[in-house]
Image (cartoon, helix red, strand yellow):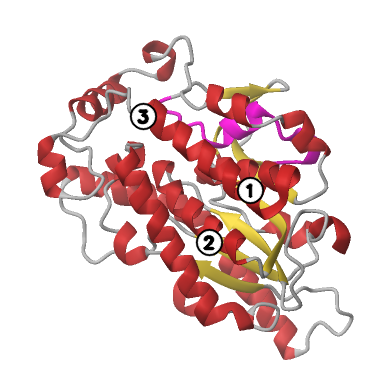
């Protein structure tokens, strides 16, 4: 197994290399922050990735990174991620969702005064995507189809990949893995119900996975040997003040919803960790999970919900560089803790 996860995947032969699992949050264009963080981790070369779980934009980052690892190791993953986000920016250059001059003066990434955003936001309150988007056009479908050979990805053993979507009918989380991961599975994980029709897969219908797990941690706990989970977060948990405008209230409702399942799962992980530490698990049936985080809550909490649809090159590049900076800080401050202890206190951050 070591061969398939390290040398064969193109990881540099380094004696201090450590193995981790990645958990990638979704959040629209804010996923470019995770792109930057992944780019820095892959560039460093001291970390071998055993498994990746992702939701929504995190699922896209996960699938693109896994495919890149399959083709060309760390450098292949970095190239694949760059190609994907550059293709997103190129398509976005022709979108009606462009920041107005007021947005550019007001706050980074905002589209609140963009005519395109105002029209889309207004229409989505009175028309469903079955009426507003009857052809079910998805701007990322062609990009993903062109950049990922999903058949080759499903056969790869270089990294364990999981993407997640919410079953509209059964209210259950669906975890797609191995041969189940298709173009439709990734699109299902990122299916915003106000913008896109539910994605049908084998007679079942799916919306964005963030409603049920953003991202869920259990797939990598159950299926991966490494105890270390590196969570790359794009949705802020804490904010500075109570929202008072209609848009700010809706934005906070969105982040509360998309963080709720993660918070509950972290409580469960903390409970199990405490049982292990107390010596309760005499037979070794329980697994202590070590949690690490890369985030930029100070910066991301200042970004409004409209910025998640801003795929302008300048904004994406800013998020990318922010992600690289925070990943660099994580490597400098916490690399030695990997495999030994959590670098993030679950009780302080999530409870």
Mark 2–mark 3 Cα distance, whole angstroms, equals 25 Å
Question: What x and y, as percent, mark residue 155?
Answer: 83, 37
Residue 47 marker: none
Residue at which label 1 appears: 77
Point out the image quarter for the N terminus.
bottom right
Mark 3–mark 1 Cα distance, whole angstroms, equals 22 Å
Q: Residue at x 72, y 31 (%)?
A: 150
Residue at which label 3 appears: 92
- Point out the frontmost of discs 3 and 1: 1
Mark 2–mark 1 Cα distance, whole angstroms, equals 11 Å
Badge 3 crowding class, 10 Å Cα cut-off, few under 14, some 14 to 19, many 20 or more, is: some
Report the span colored magenta: 175-195
Q: Residue at x 40, y 48 (%)?
A: 30
> Is 249 covered by the magenta stretch?
no
Q: Secondary structure at mark 1?
A: helix
- Locate residue 241: give its quadrant: bottom left
Question: What x and y, as percent, mark residue 56?
Answer: 53, 41
- Locate residue 216: give its quadrant: bottom right
Residue at which label 2 appears: 40
Which numbered disc, 3 or 1, marks the residue that appears first in the sequence? 1
Q: Residue at x 57, y 30 (%)?
A: 187
Which residue appears farthest toward the bottom when viewing the image?
278
Badge 1 crowding class, 10 Å Cα cut-off, few under 14, some 14 to 19, many 20 or more, is: many
**Residue 235 in view, yes or no:** no
Q: Is residue 69 above or below residue 331?
A: above
- Does residue 287 appear to the left or right of 168 in the view shown? right
> Is 177 covered by the magenta stretch?
yes
């Amino acid at each position: 197994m070591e061969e398939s996860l390290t040398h064969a995947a193109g990881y540099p032969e380094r004696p201090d290399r450590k193995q981790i699992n990645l958990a990638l949050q979704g959040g629209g264009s804010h996923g470019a922050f995770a792109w930057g963080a992944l780019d820095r981790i892959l560039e460093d070369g001291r970390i071998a990735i055993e498994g990746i779980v992702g939701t929504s934009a995190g699922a896209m980052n996960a699938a693109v990174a896994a495919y890149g690892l399959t083709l060309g190791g760390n450098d292949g993953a970095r190239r694949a991620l760059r190609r994907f986000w550059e293709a997103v920016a190129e398509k976005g250059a022709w979108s009606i969702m462009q920041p107005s001059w007021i947005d550019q003066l007001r706050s980074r990434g905002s589209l609140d005064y963009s005519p395109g955003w105002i029209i889309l936001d207004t229409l989505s309150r009175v028309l469903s995507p079955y009426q507003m988007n009857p052809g079910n056009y998805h701007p990322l479908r062609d990009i993903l189809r062109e950049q990922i050979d999903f058949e080759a990805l499903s056969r790869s053993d270089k990294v364990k990949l999981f993407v997640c979507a919410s079953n509209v009918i059964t209210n259950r989380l669906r975890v797609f893995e191995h041969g189940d991961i298709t173009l439709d599975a990734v699109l299902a994980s990122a299916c915003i119900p106000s913008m896109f029709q539910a994605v049908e897969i084998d007679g079942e219908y799916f919306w964005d996975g963030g409603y049920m797990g953003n991202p869920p941690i259990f797939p990598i706990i159950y299926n991966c040997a490494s105890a270390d989970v590196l969570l790359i977060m794009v949705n802020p948990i804490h904010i500075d003040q109570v929202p008072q405008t209609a848009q700010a209230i809706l934005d906070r409702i969105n982040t509360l919803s998309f963080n709720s399942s993660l918070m509950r799962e972290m409580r469960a992980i903390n409970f199990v960790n405490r049982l292990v530490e107390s010596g309760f698990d005499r037979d070794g049936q329980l697994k202590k999970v070590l949690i690490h985080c890369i985030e930029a809550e100070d910066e991301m909490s200042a970004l409004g919900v409209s910025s998640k649809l801003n795929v302008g090159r300048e904004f994406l590049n800013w998020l990318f560089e922010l992600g690289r900076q925070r990943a660099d800080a994580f490597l400098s401050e916490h690399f030695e803790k990997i495999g030994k202890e959590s670098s993030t206190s679950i009780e302080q951050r999530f409870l």
